[in-house]
Amino acid sequence: MYRRTLITGLAATAAAAIASPLPGTAASAQVDQAVLGSLLVARLRDAMLGVGQAPAEPPPKSLAEHFVGALADFDACRYARLAVSLPRLLRAGHALTLSGGDTAPYALLSEAYLLATRMLVKLDELQLGWLAVDRARQFAEAADVALAVAEAARQAAVLARKAGQHDQALALALSAADRPDLRRAGRAGTALRGLLIQSAAYTLTRCGDRDGMRELTDEAAAIADEIGRATLPGNQGGFSPLTVRLHRISAENHAGDPRAALDAAHSLPLNALPSVERRSRALGDIAVTYSYLGRRADCIQTLLAGERLAPEETHARPATKSLISSLLRLGPTSTDLRGLAERSGVLV
């Protein structure tokens, strides 16, 4: 009861701060962004479980439009807006499925749950992420949408990898990549197959198999080179030689070769990536690379560049907060670092 009261109170405080910022400096508004992660998790949990006070739901005919808006908020790292739009979309979709036997909302609900899964993975909320991805899979199968079924498998593989279940993560990704219906899905199916192989490659880094990671990454790169840039429907985003290069940065970091990661970063034109979220992720990975190489000043400046690009992402994401915390503990502080820590809710 105490924990639930605390979470609810935190969410209410964050919502009030976002909706009606207190007068004062811009810094005071930025500090409020540090609780965005807790706000998003609390609202998504309530929407998924059907508890709490539900806001007014969008009319059924506009649900597809609302999904496009929620996805745009995610891609632009506008998480304060997403904390409103995505839970409303989940509640409205469920209400529509309960109103009759129409299965048309199932595909939309699958996409909404995939988006929720991506956000929950970003916020390290694995337990709730498993619930979201299982619902995404069930709705995708009911709607018979092969791409959404495969994307649910990819997100499940991510969750399994983060939970240390590496064999399961590999099986999920590679089995989905070999599904006949995905192979029949044309260019979009080929692109999603590349993403699944890329996911399996990343898992191999967690198994200590650097050579296997590079082999599968090269396979994904060959697929990307073959089809060029592909924009996929719904949550899959884009797949291209650029996004494979982005993957290489983090994969080489986890394989223990930050110099190879830095080489990959140098070959990546940041502004060519398809969204603010992808560019922010690249800056986060590059900051980690600099940290591994002992280039502390470059790491801090890269984090600050990420904050300028996507402040809500920088202030809400646990992985970034953890890196900021380690910088505070393991070396001299500076005005820039202390300010970044304060805005991100990291204790100085």
Image (cartoon, rainbow, N blue to C red):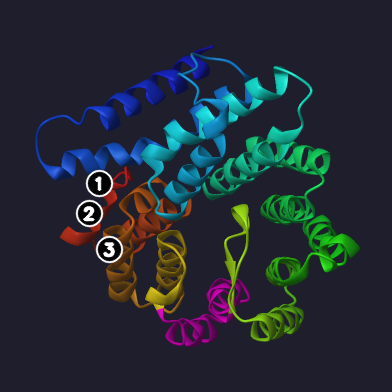
Q: Quadrant of residue 331?
A: bottom left
Against 255, residue 77 (above or below) is: above
* Residue displayed at 24% across by 43% down: 30
Quadrant housing the N terminus: top right
Q: In which quarter of the image is residue 96?
A: top right
Q: How far apart are marks 2 and 1 (CA)?
A: 6 Å
| Residue 216 visible in the snapshot | yes
| Residue type beneath disc 3 | Leu
Between the residue at mark 2 and the residue at mark 3, the CA separation in whole angstroms equals 11 Å
Instruction: State the mark number for residue 255.
Output: none
The answer to whether the residue labelled 2 contacts the one labelled 3, judged by CB atoms less than 8 Å apart, is no
Helix, strand or loop under label 3: helix
Residues rendered magenta in the picture: 241-269
Q: Is mark 2 on a helix, strand or loop?
A: helix
Residue 266 is a magenta residue: yes
Label 2 amino acid?
Arg
In the picture as drawn, the residue positioned furthest to the front comes out as 61
Q: Residue at x 49, y 38 (%)?
A: 66
Residue 342 disc label: 1
User: Marks 1 and 3, how far apart in space?
Assistant: 13 Å
